[in-house]
Image (tube, grey):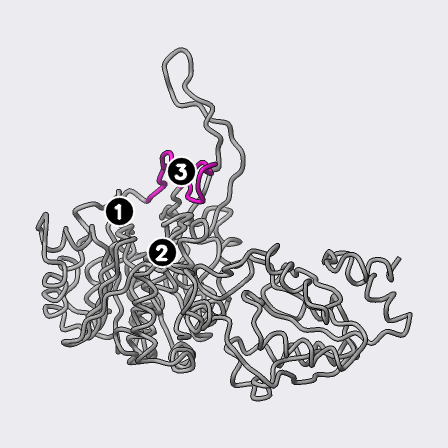
Amino acid sequence: MIATLHKTNKLIAYEQAPAVFGELRRQGQRIVQCHGTFDLVHPGHIIHLEEAKTHGDVLVITLTAEPHVNKGPGRPYFNDTMRVKSLAALECVDFVVVVPFPAAVEAIECVSPDIYCKGTEYKDMNNDPTGNIADDVATVHRVGGRIEYVGSVVYSSSKLLNNNFSVISDRVKAYCKELSAKYTPSQFRDAVESFAKLKVLLIGDAIFDRYTFVNVQGLTTKNRTLSSRFHDEDTQCGGALAVYKHLKEFSHNVDIISLVGNEPWVDAAIRSNVAPEDDHILRAADFRTTVKQRFVEESNRSKELTKLFAVNYIHEATPDARTASQLFDKVAKMITSYDLVLITDFGHGLMQQPLRELVQEKADYLGLNCQTNSNNHGFNIINRQYRKADCFSVDEQEMLLACGLRDPDFKQELAAIKSAFQAQYCWLTRGAKYTLGLNGVAAATAPSLQKNVTDTIGAGDALFSVVTLAARSGIPIDLSTFIGQLAGAQAVDTIGNTQPVNKTKLIKGGMALLNY
């Protein structure tokens, strides 16, 4: 059976692969494994694979499945079927396995190779943007194999695709190519890695986003009301809780101060999402935890959710004097111990004026996001609630409310707020149009990097999280804005705040986009 399979069908299902390769080992075959994306098979790959094959009897290629490829927007360029076909056509390749994981550990465990081959460029582990090679090596040794470095000719699939294929739009391509002339992929990676040294305090409104998935059936016959059938429901962390999870991807030293009620489900939800040592969230019996419930339908025509309507559960008054005093004292005690303080003010009761004044006076470096939403429209305006910040971000609607103009010069009005705040950095996000960043006299305009949108909820929070880290780290405005756009691209590709911005995915995607 194995011999027949070997000759006629090179594609092996991931679930079946351990048994297949176990039988080959029992037959005395030495198994060699190569792992990767192989988005565009080129001469460098062929030489790499041919050299790998000389180390054993059977060459197995494990291929990262499409949903788990971390090469940035537009990648992989070729789908699983085409990439498998390209590899299977090579005489030196004996088997191909598509692996449903982003890293190589599970692929190595699946194959248990005698020899695991990496490119010669990875002899220096610093060339790995993910930092996963140490895990790969340990896994190879654990399954009884050894590492060989092969490939006398090295090409970059990302560079070939970026320069010769329509991986991304012409506008994004021109933007990335211009940026790559100033920053190498390794400089970009080092910039993101620099965030790890920051000690961060996050203060903001905790929100739980509840997605109720329905299938719209039509209109009722009697009173023409929209009728839908319940399908599923998911509750996830939003607001400051989502920002906390983004920040934790980049720095392990993040504390959060917030306010919730004492509803029976709340404490368990916080414990499952916030590390105990980071949790400075006040539970108040007289406060109602903010829950934003959205009724949505998944579209048959596109990735983007259809949002039908929303119901918000929000505390109707400001916290009582005792609760407000407890919050104030907690912030006053902690605030001076951090490199960076972030405020995510959603206008849901946490940030009262005495607390706003305290953070503006005491924060060593203040990053500010003061949001407009349906509950506070016209009341939670950034330049009315605050007078200073070291960096801040606003979206288009928040900018319009702040300047009071219908058709403003956005750059001029953003610069005016920056000057009034004596800020070093600031950003304006305009959705799919562009993001504008300012730092001193320098400006940067970055296009949206993701054309396929699933859900825009949380995209601004994701961008704010990383650009504030970049600002505190002194990253130039064009590079920090690019980092923010990468975070936003991840956020709009998932439902709400299902997943935080993934640092590894951001680094690999950014390095690929700068590879010209």
| Chief secondary structure of the magenta portion | strand
> In the image, what residue type sits under mark 2?
Ala
Drawn side of residue 144 relative to residue 381, left or right = right
> In the image, what residue type sits under mark 3?
Thr
Viewer can see residue 198: no
Q: Which quarter shows the C terminus? A: bottom left
Give the CA separation, mark 1 to mark 2: 14 Å
Looking at the image, is mark 1 or mark 2 nearer the viewer?
A: 2
**Residue 60, position in %: x, y?**
73, 69
Q: Which mark is residue 373?
A: 1
Instruction: Name the residue rendered at 51%, 44% in the picture.
Output: 234
Question: Residue beneath label 2, please?
Answer: 459
Dot 1 and dot 2 residues touching (CB under 8 Å): no
Q: Quadrant of residue 484?
A: bottom left
Q: Which residues are magenta?
A: 293-314
> In the image, what residue type sits under mark 1?
Asn
